[in-house]
Image (cartoon, rainbow, N blue to C red):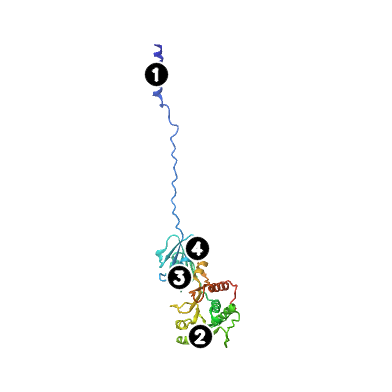
Amino acid sequence: MRVKLVLLVILLAALLSACSFGKGSKPTSAPSQTAVALPTLTATPATPLAILVMPADMDKDASDAYQKVVYDLAQQSGLRFQVRNTFTSADFEPGLQVVVVLPPDPGVVALAATAPQVQFLAINIPGVTAGANVSVLASNSQVDVPAFIAGYTAAIISDDFHTGMIYPENNANAQRALIAYTNGMSYYCGLCQPFYYVPYTFPVSIAIPANEDKASYGGYATYLIQRKVYTIYLYPDIAIKELTDFLSTTGTQVIGTTLPNPRPSGWVMTIRPDETKAIQKAWPDLVAGKGGLNVPSPLGLADVDPNLLSPGKQRLVQKVLDDLQAGRIATGVGQ
């Protein structure tokens, strides 16, 4: 009996305890809800872009050379590279940084004015001058360096140093070029004494009067050919089609500063501004955002006929040209 009473007391105590559980307890505080900051969405900057604008019908060798130099420069600077045959305001896009433009002119000045953050380099585009974000290839007005290297080359490739030059009469720059041509020849062969005696010295030169009929230019070339001149340097002002066409029929080797079209037989090489080197020279300033530059254009050898000027001899000529432009060799002509 006593045991049952004890068990009943324990049961009642348990029931009372269960009924009162939680009645007097209250949460001390509500769970906190801390605001979480959402990430800010930021636009990814566009990869900088360089564009080369060139005509679709450009000579393949020249086209390949331009594309290679701009592509290589763009890669070195971390820029994307594209080639376009035309360029309009619709071609502007985020990240565009440099545009190199070859003729014909797509309207460089107007385009540049609408995009001051883009640097333009105009290559041989008439009427475009440097300013603001437009840089231009400066013309190379040297007459003595091309003549000197022509004389050096002519001495290398002419039998018994039989060289000559045709130039315009009463032209002071042409007279300076003749001196440089003679000095270039002497730089290679000293006195350049022919093995067989002739009653004149080389180079043999002749001047064409300013009022001479162009159809008669061939007669002046004949004067040199009759004196056994094998290689002739044509001063730029008289390198007209009538003369180059005539020379191509005579077997004479010719050096000039502008390649005739079509290329005449016997054309050794062209000494002209090297636009690819000019682009390389200008590139650091362009990618740095510096515009309005007149970019000096070094001279280079182009249109070389390896049958007339072998690769080995061309390397000699190139070395002399490099030294001339670096000031290590003087043409001997007063400025």
Inspect the image, locate mark 3, and give the three-letter code of the amino acid beneath it.
Asp
Q: Residues within 10 Å of mark 3 (few under 14, many from 20)?
A: few
Q: Nearer the viewer, mark 2 or mark 4?
A: 2
Q: Earlier in the sequence, mark 2 or mark 3?
A: 3
Q: Nearer the viewer, mark 3 or mark 4?
A: 3
Inspect the image, locate mark 1, and give the three-letter code of the amino acid beneath it.
Leu
Which numbered tag is attached to residue 184? none
Q: Earlier in the sequence, mark 2 or mark 4?
A: 2
Query: Where on the picture, by quarter, is residue 154?
Result: bottom right
> What residue is pinned by disc 4?
287
Q: Which x, y percent locates residue 212?
A: 48, 87
The span from disc 4 to disc 1 (Cα, nearest Å) is: 92 Å
Whether residue 334 is visible, yes or no, is no
Identify the image quadrant of the N terminus.
Answer: top left
Q: Which x, y percent locates residue 219?
A: 48, 87
Q: Earlier in the sequence, mark 3 or mark 4?
A: 3
Q: Which x, y percent locates residue 330?
A: 59, 76
